[in-house]
Amino acid sequence: MAKLPRQLEGEEVAPLATDTEPQGHTRREFLRSATLFTATVAGLGGGLELLTRRPSGTAEAQAAAVTRKRALGPYDTSEPVTSYQAMTTYNNFYEFGLGKDDPSRNAGSLRTRPWTIKIDGEVRRPQTVDIDTLQSWFPLEDRVYRMRCVEAWSMVMPWMGFPLAALIRRLEPTGKAKYVKFTTLQDPKQMPGQRSGVLDWPYVEALRLDEALHPLAFMAVGLDGKILPNQNGAPLRLVIPWKYGFKNIKSIVRISLVSERPKTTWALAAPDEYGFYANVNPAVDHPRWSQATERRIGEVARRKTLPFNGYADAVAGLYKGLDLRRNF
Ligand SMILES: Nc1nc2c(c(=O)[nH]1)N[C@H]1C(S)=C(S)[C@@H](COP(=O)(O)O)O[C@H]1N2
Ligand SMILES: [Mo]
């Protein structure tokens, strides 16, 4: 395994960054707003203990971290969380290379502050907003979600962020808005993988508006109580736990409400292999491999893949009347 970028070295023992790191300012800002939130929800027993805990090498600190671990919320899985090492070194982020460890080695070149997100299309409040402002609009929540890549591996990831529905409601979609389109940064200087034509840049993903408004649909700014590492899609990425991982677009710079279904990157690249919906479905194989089982990173035996990645009770109703074999 190649050497990790500097900001991840020693992450296990010292996750609270110092100001000497390139991203120190970012983290300090993030922690400040998160701490504010923790103060307001402390009495509710939820919130950001994961963020505010201070793991260190001492047994005492580790015990404190365990006992302060928050209770699981209604959307969380109780399955064991994947190791932070795996979540941050086994990634797909083709803007930084095709190998699983390329993003962790190369994404240090991504500058995540200042960072703005353009919001446009069928909304009453089109605007370009700074990431820190956007983040301050919402109390941050934790979500422990399964993540199932279309390549048939999976993880359990503890995100921090806010519901996508909260953002969309705030933007006030017009009656013509039917889809939400997301676009990743395009800048080959920061994203060396964009110098290759492996995908049509920038990476684009989209959801139907009703999918985007579902309470499971999430915008992440943090992972495991720490600011989102660049390789996981800093500073803002989508998390849709019932869909294949490629829907979870990273490093978002634009969110557009639109009336027509957008063309999305993987569906354009290989329309026979990747559909618009990309709902996890063990009954519909990828043309080149089975989707019936998956390799959970950190486990030996394969797991059965569940319809909608185990979220069928919550989301199957969104697709009533839709032929899920045709609309894969
Ligand atoms: N912009 C962008 N977003 C992306 C990708 C990508 O290559 N570029 N890869 C997707 C795929 S295939 C997966 S499985 C997830 C992986 O997220 P993770 O590395 O945080 O686990 O990111 C998704 N989002
Ligand atoms: Mo993926």
Image: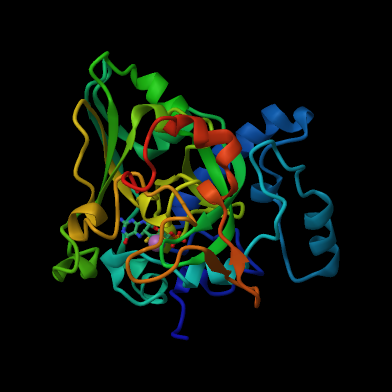
Relative to residue 89, is residue 33 depicted above or below? above
Q: Nearer the viewer, residue 249 or 140?
A: 249
Q: Nearer the viewer, residue 52 or 173?
A: 173
Relative to residue 143, is residue 175 depicted above or below? above
Where is residue 238, by image quadrant? top left
Say left or right for 208 vs 26.
left
Percent from the top left, x then y, of residue 251? 34, 51
Relative to residue 222, is residue 92 depicted above or below? below
Residue at (41, 76) in percent of width and height: 101
Where is residue 232, by image quadrant? bottom left
Question: Which quadrant of the figure shows ligand 2?
Answer: bottom left
Percent from the top left, x then y, of residue 132? 41, 38
Percent from the top left, x then y, of residue 96? 29, 69
Relative to residue 16, is residue 176 depicted above or below? above
Which color scheme did the rendering employ for the protein? rainbow
Percent from the top left, x then y, of residue 214? 48, 30
Q: Residue furthest bottom?
A: 1
